[in-house]
Image (cartoon, rainbow, N blue to C red):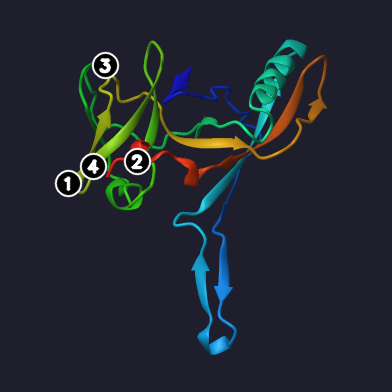
Amino acid sequence: MTYLDYDVWLTRPTRRKTPSITITSDNEMLGKLYSQQRRVFLYNLPISEYVFEFFQYDQSERQTLLAFFDSMKGRYGKFWLPSFKQDVSLTQASGGGEEILYIQNINFTYIYYGDGYPKHLLIRLPSSDFGCVVYGSDIVDADTEELYISPVLPEALATTKEINFLSLVRFNQDELLFTQLEGNSSTCNIKFLEVINEYPEEWIPI
């Protein structure tokens, strides 16, 4: 699957190991005298690193993983990474062709719809996965918010379907290391670094 010209990573991580998420915000102290120093942030938004554990049933699955890693040229290439958790929950079903999602109030309007923050979703539809951008949001009441998405839903969406946040990332390691398990299976811990400062401006509606 691709979204906005980049591949989407769809392989789910294992559930036996809790994902690691590290958030950093690079900054520097400027000024020679202590009384004149001030902290300057190098980027407007924090950068997140995600670490997930993935399971490979056999050699062919390891080869598939290595092939994708090689296609990205290690840390060079960019692709989309879902959160693999229910970030947004619907309060009512939406029909095909609709552009509004009614969700449980999570303060999306204030927290996630800040200036310059990319707002992309991966919606698990019955027939396929669907990527979209949130171009607006409003608070309906204390329990409900509405999100305006583009493109519109290609088919009906039930309230039980999973909706993930999408992050544009690259690999944050130079090689993949596999841990052998019973038989021919294995696991692999993979680090992903969000490239928050490399989102094209046309992907960030205001």
Q: Earlier in the sequence, mark 1 or mark 3?
A: 1
Q: Are marks 3 and 2 in contact (CB under 8 Å)?
A: no
Q: Nearer the viewer, mark 3 or mark 2?
A: 2
The residue located at (73%, 29%) in the rendering is: 188
The C terminus - image quarter: top left
Q: Earlier in the sequence, mark 4 or mark 3?
A: 4
The residue located at (81%, 23%) in the rendering is: 181
Q: Disc 3 marks which residue?
A: 156
Q: Are marks 2 and 1 in contact (CB under 8 Å)?
A: no
| Observer-nearest of 50 and 16 | 50
SS at circle 2: loop
Q: Could you tell me the amino acid type at mark 4?
A: Ser
SS at circle 1: loop
Residue 20 against residue 155 in the figure, above or below: below
Q: Image quarter for residue 77? A: top right
Q: Image quarter for residue 158? A: top left
Q: Nearer the viewer, mark 1 or mark 3?
A: 3
